[in-house]
Structure formats: structure tokens, C-alpha cells
Amino acid sequence: MRVSKVTKEKRILTVQGWIIDGVQEDFMRKQMRNEWGISTRQAKRYIADAYKSWKTDAEIDMETRRQAKIAELQQLKRSLKKDYKGTPAGIRAIMAVEKQIIRLEPYSVKRVDVTSGGEKIEPMSPRTVIIQEYNG
């Protein structure tokens, strides 16, 4: 029996919720058979589609995700209550958000090679510098 596209998407979202909750696949398939009256094969297909859906979501451009996070943090900073903003705790909260924004903003670290007399080294993001320091 065919279902509408909307119904299928709702079912896949339900399956994703079960996966997040840590429900075992056997129980998921049994629940799908009981609730939706589908075959085991179709239940397996729903589970596979749920995982595939996450994969496409994960492939969203990293720059877009970074920009969205910066916007979210700026909104968080703006939404701080007025009577809280002037307090030391409020200032600490704003500074913590600012620190996260700075980490996400794309700025370059100008590096100079001291062993060669000050020749310029290619610009790197702070994340690259941290990774290089970690890798040695």
C-alpha cells in the first residue's frame, strides 16, 4: 500500500527519533509493522532512508552552518534581559558569547618565520594553527 510523500517523511522523522533515543532496530521494525502495517522489508527501507537523510543534512556547506551559528549567537547576545546586561554575570555571559563568535569568524593569523629572517608564511585560520600545534 502506497502512502503520500508527507506521510512517508513523517514516518522517517519518527524513525530518526527512535534512532536518537537508542531504540534497537528489531524493536523499531516490530513497532513499524504494528503501527503502520508495513512489511519488514519496508521497515528496513525506512530505517535506511532515515540514515540517508542525516547524511544529506550533514553535507550542508560548512560555511552556511558557520554563518548560521554566528547569527544564532548574536541573537542570543541581543536577547539578554536589560536588567541583566549591566551586572557582572551578564557581562560574563556576553563575553562568553563574544568569545564563541570570535572563534567562528574567519580571520587570518599573520605568521612570520623567525628562522628565515622574517619571511611571511601563508595565512592560516586559528583552527589550522591549533591543529598544527596539536600534530606537532
Image (cartoon, grey):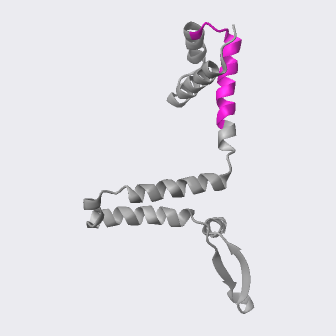
Most distant residue in the bottom direction: 117
Can you tell which quarter of the image residue 66 is in? bottom right
Residue 75 at x, y percent in the picture = 44, 55
**Above or below for 125 versus 35:** below
- Give the residue at x 62% y 24%: 9
Q: Position of residue 115 (x, y in %)?
A: 71, 88
Q: Which residues are magenta?
A: 36-54
Quarter of the figure with residue 24: top right
For this view, does 116 lie left or right of residue 84?
A: right
* Drawn side of residue 86 relative to residue 113, left or right: left
Where 16 sits versus 79, above or below? above
Q: Which residue is drawn at the image coordinates 69% and 25% (left, top)? A: 48
* x and y percentages locating residue 105 in the rendered image: 57, 65
Q: Is residue 56 magenta?
A: no
> Which residue is pictured at 68% across the width and 72% down the height?
124
Return the residue nearer the eye: 8 or 45: 8
Magenta-highlighted stretch: main secondary structure? Answer: helix
**Front-most of 108 and 131?**
108
Specify whether 84 is left or right of 2. Answer: left
Q: Position of residue 136 (x, y in %)?
A: 66, 69
Which quadrant of the rendered structure holds the N terminus?
top right
Answer whether residue 41 is magenta in the image: yes
